[in-house]
């Protein structure tokens, strides 16, 4: 009995041990065959096992690390030009947004704080400035946008504009306050800095006439260019002059200072024809002879220039001094006196004016120092009817042609000669 009981105990103990081993083996077999999980459910399962929930033991090794989450890319803001490139102020600033949507773009002049106007596209993908920028300026760019996940983003940048070594300002003649001009008035543009690229400047200068007339530019120098039609302007013409030069590279670091526009009106065609052979001057209004008056032109020692002259100024009284053209006090022929009813026709001292001292010679002899002498009554009539841009044509005076650079010797040149003076034809 004793042995039997002991043997039985050892047998039961062995049997129970085998059962426990079998149960452990079954448990390991369930843990090694889980169900297939999606990425989201696998993440949930990992989260659950980490907190003590679930039916199986925690995974071994690297499976205990947190899941990797892909970062949402930040919007990409592209500013044209970039901060290393100087912008011509006539070109726009362009801002583009990729991988996001802009809802606000603010561009300001960093020195003045002035905002630059612009337009954002409906889809928020780009913004373009619409205002004119300044030379040598820095502009601050601020962009507020939304990333693809809805998160807000703010980015900034800068834009610099070109800094010219000089800015050439175009002055117009006739001046804008001139109510009207005569048919001989050239259009003159004078620059305060030399223009090294005349062709480029000429492309950005324009003259439009109504009614239309063919015309062209002629460069007298690097700072002055004239425009005239093939023949005198038609009476009643409206002329529009434009200089679209801001932002234009005129060579050697010089840029146009501004854009300008002017409107010029042409009045009746007043043309005086002074003949040194007959010593008479015929006056024509729109082609009709309206008056003839005796004159005295320049003496043989001081002959008047021949050719068309254009009136550039008129004054009730002028002090005339021969020293202005080289005959000074103490020299033969010197004079300095007040002269009335003066209309200038060249810069070297030629006028149409009242000359009571030469009335006896008017109509018979040329005794002036190059001017057109008239009696006081005829000078008053002429002064009342002739104005800026009107024409005085002088013939048979014995003098040389009026130089083209003597104010307005423009009409001395033939049309082919005039066209050759264009920078676009050279």
Image: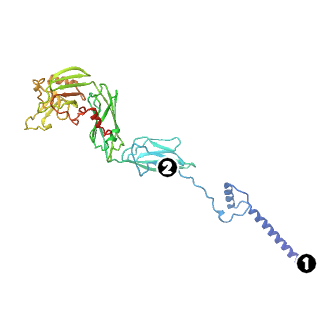
Residue at image x 90%, y 80%? 3
Quadrant housing residue 319: top left
Q: Where is residue 59 in the image (x, y as percent from the top left)?
A: 69, 63
- Among numbered discs 1 and 2, the one appearing first in the sequence: 1
Q: Name the residue under label 2.
A: 77
Decide if residue 104 is on the left or right side of residue 291: right
Closer mark to the observer between disc 1 and disc 2 = 2
Count residues near mark 2 (Cα–Cα under 10 Å), then give few for <14, some for 14-19, many for 20+. Answer: many
Residue 46 numbered tag: none
How many numbered dots are placed on residues in this image? 2
Where residue 198 appears, as percent x and y from the top left, is 31, 41
Q: Are marks 1 and 2 in contact (CB under 8 Å)?
A: no
In which quadrant of the rendered image does the C terminus lie?
Answer: top left
Side of 22 relative to 382 (left or right): right
> At 26% across and 24% down in the image, what residue appears?
269
Say which of 425 and 227 sits in front: 425
State the SS at label 2: strand
Residue nearest the viewer, comparing 41 with 241: 241
Left or right? Give the position of 174 relative to 315.
Answer: right
Residue 54 horizontal/vertical position (percent): 72, 60
From the viewer's perspective, is residue 166 above or below residue 285?
A: below
Within-10-Å neighbours for mark 1: few <14, some 14–19, many 20+ = few
Residue 381 drawn at (x, y percent):
19, 22
Q: Farthest right residue?
A: 1
Which residue is under mark 1?
Answer: 4
């Amino acid at each position: 009995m004793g042995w039997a009981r002991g043997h039985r105990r050892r047998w039961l103990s062995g049997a129970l041990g085998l059962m426990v081993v079998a149960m452990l083996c079954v448990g390991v077999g369930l843990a090694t065959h889980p169900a297939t999980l999606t990425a989201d459910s696998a993440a949930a399962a990992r989260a659950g096992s980490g907190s003590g929930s679930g039916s199986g033991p925690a995974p071994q090794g690297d499976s205990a690390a947190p899941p990797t989450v892909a970062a949402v890319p930040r919007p990409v803001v592209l500013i044209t030009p970039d901060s290393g490139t100087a912008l011509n102020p006539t070109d726009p600033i362009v801002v583009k947004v990729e991988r996001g949507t802009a809802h606000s773009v603010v561009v300001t002049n960093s020195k003045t704080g002035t905002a630059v106007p612009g337009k954002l596209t409906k889809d928020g993908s780009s913004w373009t400035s619409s205002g004119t920028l300044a030379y040598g300026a820095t502009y601050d760019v601020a962009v507020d946008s939304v990333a693809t996940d809805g998160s807000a983003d703010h980015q900034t940048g800068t834009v610099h504009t070109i800094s010219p070594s000089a800015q050439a300002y175009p002055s117009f003649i006739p001046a804008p306050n001139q109510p009207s001009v005569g048919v001989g008035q050239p259009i003159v543009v004078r620059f305060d800095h030399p223009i090294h690229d005349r062709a480029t400047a000429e492309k950005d200068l324009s003259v439009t006439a109504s009614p239309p007339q063919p015309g062209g530019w002629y460069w007298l120098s690097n700072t002055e260019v004239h425009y005239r039609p093939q023949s005198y302007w038609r009476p009643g013409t409206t002329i529009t002059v434009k200089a679209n030069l801001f932002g234009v590279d005129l060579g050697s670091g010089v840029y146009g200072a501004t854009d300008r526009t002017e409107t010029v009106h042409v009045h009746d065609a007043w043309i005086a024809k002074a003949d040194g052979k007959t010593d008479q001057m015929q006056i024509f209004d729109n082609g009709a002879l309206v008056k003839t008056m005796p004159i005295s032109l320049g003496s043989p020692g001081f002959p008047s220039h021949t050719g068309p002259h254009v009136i550039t100024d008129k004054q009730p009284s002028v002090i005339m001094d021969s020293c202005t053209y080289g005959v000074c006090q103490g020299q033969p022929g010197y004079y300095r006196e007040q002269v009335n009813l003066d209309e200038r026709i060249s810069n070297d001292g030629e006028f149409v004016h009242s000359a009571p001292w030469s009335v006896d010679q008017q109509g018979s002899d040329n005794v002036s120092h190059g001017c057109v002498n008239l009696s006081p009554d005829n000078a008053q009539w002429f002064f009342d009817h002739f104005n800026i841009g009107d024409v005085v044509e002088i013939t048979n005076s014995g003098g040389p042609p009026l130089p083209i650079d003597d104010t307005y010797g423009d009409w001395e040149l033939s049309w082919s000669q005039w066209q050759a003076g264009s920078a676009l034809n050279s």
